[in-house]
Image (cartoon, helix red, strand yellow):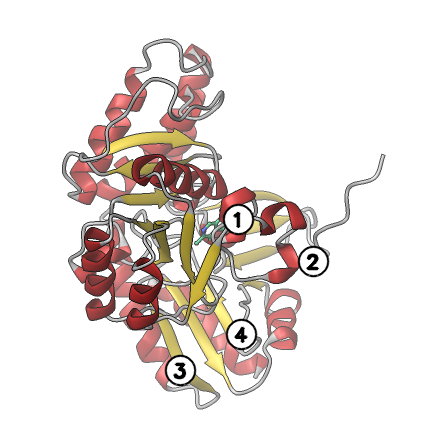
Amino acid sequence: MSLFDVYPLFDITPVKAKDVFVYDKNGIEYLDLYGGHAVISIGHSHPEYVSSLSNQLNHIGFYSNSIQNPLQVELAQDIETLSGCKDYQLFLCNSGAEANENALKLASFQTGKSKVIAFKNGFHGRTSAAVAATDNAKIIAPINAQQEVERFELGDLKGVENALAKNDVCAIIIETIQGIGGLDEVSTEFFKGLEALSKKYNTMLIADEIQCGFGRTGDFFAFQKHGITPDIISMAKGMGNGFPIGGILIHPSIKASYGLLGTTFGGNHLACAASLAVLKVLRCENLMENAKTVSNYFAEKAKAIPQIKAVKGRGLMLGLEFDFPIADLRKDLIYKHHIFTGSAKNPNLLRILPPLTIQKKHVDLFFEALKKAL
Ligand SMILES: Cc1ncc(COP(=O)(O)O)c(C=O)c1O
């Protein structure tokens, strides 16, 4: 049987990884500035993570959501403590798309409405309502296109208000910092405007923190810089450091009822053990502080490279904008200099999404290689 060929692959076969390095089957060491697409938060194979998962597996790896699972309660408490988001309720699932799917569904249940407002260049996942809210016609199948979505330019508050005034919108969904779209982030004024409008028109404001959340920007959630209180916050990627887990934080004003949401695998024992280990390491190793420090160092070093026209993003969710397409540069970085980086919808943008454990010496390695590659 062959694999369904949907991914253009680099010819590299990783067999081992440690902290910010990945090793292929030939023993070549790669510096990982991509983190498997912003997933690796506390570093590959962190000892705390390995022991938490192995220990859990030796006790119980899985049972359904029909029994008590104290690990879920502990996870909810730890997320509240580290994020400072008080009294939200946690619903656990298995991926980013599923988190947004549940967020949108819940918004529709809560408001009794069905239209979604989303933004140009936004990405929210590949399933039903999540993919319909995503700005990429190529991945929206006819079955998804029936979902009513109205899309606006980032910053177009007037357009958003005109749409809300028709009173059929259940949710406004926005990535606090766009990932694949190219690291754009709107102003605090715009976020506050969205918050006020969603209250005025009984609509749920969903902050998609799947990529930018869980410490990546140096704040636990990227929206916290803007001082807003979303109705629903979606999370995944860095939450499990590679173990599939996603979730939504639900504002206390939204009431649960039995059967409203549900999942077989979501919140299983192993997934909780992975995420608890992530939170412990984030806290004990001050990784959010590290994200800010290394980010500033990175931006300083970027200034010395004339070919870099702009540094976009925040913390360890960065984009280096060149005035030429970066596809060949990215290949050189991987094959000649053994450094993983990411690409974006903007062909001139090189994305940097390293584990939050990265140190200045690793940034130095990158810039030495980048200079040679350029
Ligand atoms: C902002 C954002 N939302 C949602 C998703 C979908 O997550 P997943 O691939 O886990 O379904 C992604 C994945 O890249 C993302 O970056």
| Cβ–Cβ under 8 Å for marks 4 and 2 | no
Q: Estimate the spatial distance between the alpha carbons at disc 4 and disc 2, rounded to whole Å.
A: 20 Å
Q: Residue at x 17, y 42 (%)?
A: 85
- For label 3, the residue is 310
* Residue 357 visible, this angle: no
Give the label on residue 147, or none: 1
Question: Label 2 vs label 3: CA separation?
Answer: 27 Å
In percent of width and height, residue 34 lies at 50, 58
Q: Nearer the viewer, mark 4 or mark 2?
A: 4
Cβ–Cβ under 8 Å for marks 1 and 4: no
Task: Give the residue furthest to the bottom.
Answer: 306
Instruction: Where is residue 369? Give x, y as percent.
Output: 52, 74
Q: Are marks 2 and 3 in contact (CB under 8 Å)?
A: no
Q: CA distance from mark 2 to mark 1?
A: 35 Å
For marks 2 and 3, the one nearer the N-term is: 2
Question: Is residue 255 shown above or below 69?
Answer: below
Q: Amino acid at mark 4?
A: Asn
Tag 3: amino acid: Ala
Residue receiving disc 4: 346
Of 219 and 249, nearer the camera is 249
Other residues around mark 1 within 10 Å, as few (<14) / some (14–19) / many (≥20): some
* Secondary element type, mark 2: loop
Disc 2 marks which residue? Answer: 10
